[in-house]
Amino acid sequence: MRQCTGCKKELYQLSRESSFGTPIYDDEQLFRVLCYKILQTGLNEKVIANKKREIEKAFDQFNIKKIAQYDESKILELLNNKNMIRHEGKIRAIIHNANQIIRLQNNYQSFSTYLWQFSKNQTLNYDIDAHLLSPLQFATMISNALKKESFKFVGPKTILSFIHEIGIIYAKKVCIYKE
């Protein structure tokens, strides 16, 4: 487990990548992290980390195409799974967002291409570049763009945590969670 050096917030790695903040370009991995961040909204990260195995299984290892096809019976199954985060709005948002990612893949080649365009395909390092937009302002910009693309449960703080974990922004010495 990693901690933010500024505020001591515990940072739980939710992706399968070897290191928190390592740039991720694979659409399935990006979707996995986004889903975890959506599920975590309003909850302690430790709750999600402790249920990770069950969540992976319940959501078909976060296969975008499978999740995009979920129907009402699958939603009911997820809502009745005691090992899941049983929040209907979050579950429906994940299914909806899977469909939006498929649409973005058709329009932008990949979800990764769409996301990384905001940072001009590079990691923004807040430890060395003081001229960048604040992390929350940058996350808000991406959040608003995703909302325009019809994504759900993608508020600025959710997106801030998401882009930090997937390596779009980097900050080891600077706390990005306090504004």
Image (cartoon, rainbow, N blue to C red):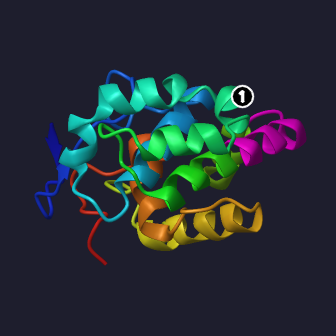
The relative height of residue 85 versus residue 149 in the rendered view (above or below) is above
In the image: residue 86, left or right of residue 75: left
Answer whether residue 179 is visible to the viewer in this image.
yes
In the image: residue 22, left or right of residue 32: left
In the image: residue 21, left or right of residue 29: left
> Which x, y percent locates residue 131?
47, 68
Instruction: Return the residue at label 1.
Output: 65
Quick one: 148 or 66, which is closer to the camera? 66
Residue at image coords 59%, 55%: 93
Please tell me how crowded label 1 is: few (under 14), some (14-19), or many (20+) other residues with Cα within 10 Å: some
Quick one: 70 or 103, which is closer to the camera? 70
> Which x, y percent locates residue 87?
43, 57
Quick one: 171 or 94, which is closer to the camera? 94
> Which x, y percent locates residue 141?
61, 69
Q: Amino acid at mark 1?
A: Lys
The relative height of residue 50 versus residue 134 in the rendered view (above or below) is above
61 in the magenta segment: no
What stretch of residues is rendered in magenta? 98-110
- Quarter assignment of residue 75: top right
Residue at image coords 35%, 41%: 84
